Image: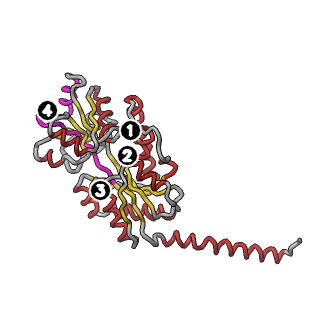
Amino acid sequence: MHLSRHTALWIRSVLAMLVLCMAAPIILAQQAWPTRPVKVVVTFPPGGVGDIMARLVSQQLSEALGQPFAVDNRGGGGGNVGSSVVAKSQPDGYTLVVTATSVESINPLIYASMPFNPSKDLTPVSMLGGVKLFLVVKPGLPVNDTKELVSLAKSSPGKLSFGSASTGSMTHLAAELFTQQAGISATHIPYRGAAPALQDLLGGQIDYLLDPGIAFSHVRAGKLKMLAVASMTRSSLFPQVPTLHELGYRDVNGDTVFGLYAPAGTPAQIITRLNQEVNKILASPTLKAKFTEFGGEPMIMTPNEVTAWAKAEANLFGDIIKTRGIKAE
């Protein structure tokens, strides 16, 4: 059937209007987001640094966006359990996850199998913040600085021991990098969390630990000695303590950083909005002061910068994971 030019144009106009009408609810929904509560899965138990950061930022997001951002703690699997739940959720902006960037950078290297593909199934929204690792030694160990610790370890190969929060954790990997770069041999003792490792350090069962900021009170009380910071920059809480980077161990950067992610396919408008709101919150002096209380530091980044950070972590620790044969337990 041959249609006149006028009729064809009319049909095209009607079809275009129908397409616009069908798309309008989606566009409006994206623009109006959020219109209901948002669930923020946190891959750590309550009370930890990552959990505290997530709760502080979620509270501020609730106030800024007018909908509850409710925290749901789902630990396990080095962050894989909670992250997998979000990776398989609807990409509509109503399910997010706060986890360490190591889920994307380290976990694929140390787990025999992953329940999801972090780089494909999650999309970064923003960074929240990070905590540094601090080289602390047990009471009575006859060393006063990192040079003396290294000399002691070299004089008694394999006799010193160090603890970690778990095999494959940042406290473990950074310590392995330190032993490699220092040219020393020491025995790794993994624990189920940093707290029990710290207790054994205080009790003298292990010789040193890269502490994620829970030993501060013991250091200030003189019960433990802090020798260095395993970071590229000094800590504002202990500005007199040098970094391992300054002391010549240039690749020993053990900063543990926490990011906010969404399921892959989440509309770009929502990712952009969230990134802007989170970064605005992180720039607040009040928020920064609260982070400082537990040794945290806000980190303002774009989604692309979060991805770059994770890639740098994978490059930094990839060789030591392979050469030491490190596998998650």
What's the distance in space between the residues labelled 2 and 4, CA to CA?
32 Å
Label 2 neighbourhood size at 10 Å, few (<14), some (14-19), many (20+)?
many
Label 1 neighbourhood size at 10 Å, few (<14), some (14-19), many (20+)?
some
Which stretch appears magenta? 129-154
**Picture coordinates of residue 172, whole percent (x, y):** 31, 38
What's the distance in space between the residues labelled 2 and 3, CA to CA?
15 Å
What's the distance in space between the residues labelled 1 and 3, CA to CA?
22 Å
Locate the N terminus and report the quarter of the image it occupies. Answer: bottom right
Residue 106 magenta-drawn? no
Labelled pair 1, 2 in contact (Cβ < 8 Å): yes
Q: Residue furthest right?
A: 1
Which quadrant of the figure has residue 234?
Answer: top left
**Picture coordinates of residue 130, whole percent (x, y):** 32, 51
Residue at 24% of width from left, 25% of height from top?
Answer: 158
Q: Is residue 239 left or right of residue 53?
A: left
Labelled pair 2, 3 in contact (Cβ < 8 Å): no
Q: Which residue is mark 1?
A: 328
Depth order, front residue of 185/327: 327
**Picture coordinates of residue 64, whole percent (x, y):** 37, 70
Q: Earlier in the sequence, mark 4 or mark 1?
A: 4
Name the mark on residue 141.
4
Q: Which label lies toward us, 4 or 3?
A: 3
Q: Which residue is mark 2?
A: 78
Q: Secondary structure at mark 3?
A: loop
What's the distance in space between the residues labelled 4 and 3, CA to CA?
34 Å
What's the distance in space between the residues labelled 4 and 1, CA to CA?
30 Å
Labelled pair 2, 4 in contact (Cβ < 8 Å): no
The residue type indicated by label 2 comes to Gly
The residue type indicated by label 1 comes to Ala
Name the mark on residue 46.
3
